[in-house]
Amino acid sequence: MKKIVFESLVLALALGLAWSDVEIFRAEYHFQKGEDKKGRPDYAGALEQYEMAAAILPDRYSYQRAVGKTSYKLYDPGSGNLRPLYQSYEAYQRVLALDPHYPYGWFEMADVLDEFERAKVSGLDSPEPYFRRALEIDPSNPRFLAGLLDWKLRHGQNEAAWGLFLELIRSYPYAVVKIGPAMLKTDRDFARLGREIDVGGPAAIEYAKYLVRVRRMEEAQGLLTRLEGQKAARLVVAGLMSDVYMSRGETAKARETLSNALAAAPGDLALNSRLVKVFMKERDDEGAIAVYKKAFTYHPGRWELASAAAGLAMKIGHDDEAIDLFTQALDTGKPDANTKKRIYELRAKLRAKRHDFGGAIADYEKILDLDPDNENAIHAIKKVKIEMEYAGHSGR
């Protein structure tokens, strides 16, 4: 009798496990279908699949969160239809119950509650404690800091927002550029950040970039002067300082600053690019060509450097140099088909101009190898052959 009871229990357990495996498979099948639809993107279809997965395994955190995120995605503030927002809210209630220690659940619920606030729906929690709970779990998360900062600004809590701004740029220096337009609106704001920013940290560099971008050149120069002693930032500082000089038309100072920096880092592309602009401003095409050529020696795969130098050489009538540089650009093997066609065409014209008719025809034929129906190349070959025949008859 005991043996029969034991075997029955084993069978029941096996059947239970087998059924459990089937449920897991079914739920995951719907979830993956939802992921596929989300990628298309078909959010309504994705939500339907996520809801089916969550109905089969309601205790699966990832399924409930997918329902919450997708419902929120489907909410259109201008439609007046709050149903997707309520669906999202209910899903995130389950998310927080399943795992109260995962910060993104709190942050995403805060976003949902924030939308309810914007829609003037009363009777629900303020999003602020949800933002704060996410930050308690992950204090330096830039997304959480930015979310709470934005909420504070919209509620007129500017001083609290300022403190969050300083925290944010410590963990995510680029926030100076991203959040700067919202935080830095008056001379007083700029002066305050100039005082409070950590000159020894990376945020100071981003602030200097922002000052240059918004054309506050005096403040940029002051900050850059303070940053010049930082060895790790010297190349960026030199580039930005040259931007300051260029804004005033002081090309000689910009050129000197960049040349000094390039002596230590001759292959730096950002500095070389700036130096080209200086020479172009000074109408010194040969100087710009020399910069491009030198940079190309350090970056032999960057065909665009050789091509840019070739274009300038062609502009000032240095045809042989242009032909050589276009050849170097092609020899990298890096240009795409359309770029190759353009380079072949330019080189062909230069060769025809130099009475290298065979070379010109060969270049046009290379275009036809890439694009057999290219009518411009077909007509160009005919024209070059006529020129070649005329040159032969005239004895040129």
Image (cartoon, rainbow, N blue to C red):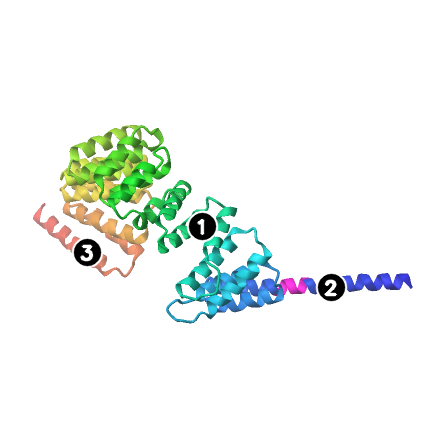
Q: How many marks?
A: 3
Mark 3 vs mark 2: give the one in front. 2
Q: Are marks 3 and 2 in contact (CB under 8 Å)?
A: no
Q: Residue at x 51, y 62 (%)?
A: 68
Q: Separation of disc 1 and disc 2 at Cα?
A: 43 Å
Decide if residue 323 is on the left or right side of residue 60. left
Report the front residue among 314 and 240: 240
Amino acid beneath label 3: Ala
Q: Which residue is mark 2?
A: 16
Residue 16, image quadrant: bottom right
Report the front residue among 76 and 297: 76
Residue 305 is covered by the magenta coloring: no
Residue 106: % across, % down:
51, 54
- Magenta-drawn segment: 21-26
| Residue 342, visible in the rendered structure | yes
Q: Earlier in the sequence, mark 1 or mark 3?
A: 1
Amino acid beneath label 2: Gly
Q: Quadrant of the C terminus?
A: top left
Residue 262, image quadrant: top left
Find residue 144 and name its label: 1
Amino acid beneath label 1: Phe
Q: Quadrant of the N terminus?
A: bottom right
Residue 360: % across, % down:
21, 49
* Farthest-out residue, left: 394
Residue 309: % across, % down:
22, 41
